[in-house]
Amino acid sequence: MGREFRIRLTIVLIVFSLILSLLIALFDYKKLEERVRIGQDTKIAMAEDKIIDSLATIDKVYSILDDQTGNLMEEYSKELVAKYEVEPDFANWDFEALRNQFNMDVFILDEENTVIHSSLKQDLGLDFSDCCPNFSKLLDERRNGNEFVHDGMDIQTKTGEIKKFSYIPTPDHRYLLELGVELEDEEIFRQFNFLKTVEVLEKKYDDVIQSIRIYNPKGVLMGIQGDEEFRNIDESLLPLFKQALKSGQAEEGVRVDGGSRVTYRYIPYTADERRGYSTNRVVEIVYTDVELSGMLSAYQNEYMVQLAIILAAAIVLSFFIARLVAKPVYLAFHDSLTGLKNRAAFEEEFKKRFEKDSEGKALMMIDLDNFKSINDLLGHREGDRILRLAASTIQDVTGQGNVAARIGGDEFIVLLSKTDLEEAEHIASTLIGKVNEELSCLRNKAKLAPSISVGIAFASADDDFETLYEKADRALYRSKENGKNQYNLYQVG
């Protein structure tokens, strides 16, 4: 059994034990911390979970049930495209009439992603490249594409209304035709209104939570209509908001409001089915900050002692486990005599590498010539020594980047991972010469002629292990037939 394998196994077990120990100790510490918080964090966590579940529910419902709205928007969008082909001058369009016809707002976005025409006057001049660079990139992709797309739930930037938007490019890719339909009056929204969930949570946990708000990725408050400035996130909190959005992790910050310490917690949310930019949102929970550090410090020493004991026990246990299981694990994947991979492990490695890329891969079959005579004349002990010597030579010559294995009594196989004809022939020639050199003493002393024969087959896209093995075996057979101590390449026919 390889000493290196045993060391690696021990290290893996120690690392695993350390990680497990750290997780257990951290879990215990978190339980202590939870007791100290006396339910405050529980209330915040419950509020967080409920609002996230509420958002996830309405997004899932819309992903399943709003196909009818999406299909209607697609139908109207294609009508707009047809209208554009007849009349490309938007100045001649009656956007108010279109709004009444579709019962949807109509927007025209130019190549700068600016709203140049709209049935909603407040949005005229809205420049997405200025206010929302990431969303603007998405709009560029859609304008340069050829498909109709409809997003999930979003808000009207200027008014705060919750809407659903769709986009389709004009045939000349100069404009995006956008439709927006109000969702708050729809039955789906009324049944799964996350804004009502917010109101209920704020009342239920009013002793801890001051407010719960939901922002779109642009930092605009959802569900609140009115002055645009009021609906934008506070500039001082914007860096924290952006960090949460970027990292995908909850972020917290503390500041003093009205003489009291208040914690602002931002939780990023992404729908399971991402539809456009609007399915990313950030939940803001504002709650009063309770001084916990003093209470938690009493548990610090207990936690550190517990962690030290667990780590020490884990390390000792890892050494014992490694000694017990190292050999059985090693022999499950390696040949006990030579230390090379066995056939099962080789086939597994072959499939893993071959599935990634078959290009530049070749299979080399190697057979010890006259090995039966060596066993008969010199005994199995000497035969085993020669097998180990051959395996070591094969491993050294073929290199670490390739995979060698013993698959039978005197048969070996090598997967050349990245090679060409010249390199494969060089490896085979070097291997034959090296084995001849290593076994030359047998020629002189025992009057034997030990050598190796090699067969090489290059993989094609249609090959698998069995077919490539058969090709290499045929090439090996040709080497044997032609006098041994040589290599041959598989050739069709």
Image (cartoon, helix red, strand yellow):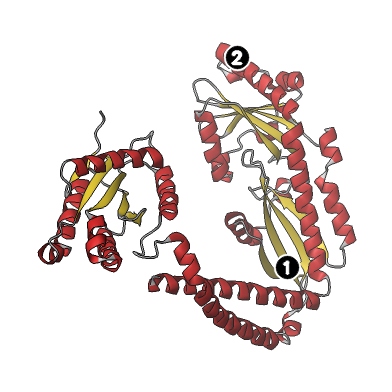
Nearest the viewer among 306 and 271 is 306
In the rendered structure, the answer to whether residue 227 lies left or right of residue 167 reads: right
In the visual, does 467 lie left or right of 246? left
Q: Nearer the viewer, residue 41 or 23?
A: 23
Identity of the amino acid at label 2? Answer: Ala
SS label for mark 2: helix
The residue beneath circle 2 is 82
Q: Which mark is residue 370?
A: none
Q: Is residue 473 above or below residue 210?
A: above
Q: Residues within 10 Å of mark 1 (few under 14, many from 20)?
A: many
Rendered location of residue 167, percent (x, y): 61, 29
Q: Quadrant of the C terminus?
A: top left
Question: Which disc, if any, is residue 263?
Answer: 1
Where does the image place residue 396, in percent across and percent down from the top left?
25, 62
Name the residue rendered at 75%, 52% in the picture: 52
Amino acid type at image mark 1: Thr
* Most foreground residue, 296 or 105: 296
Location of residue 234 (image quadrant): bottom right
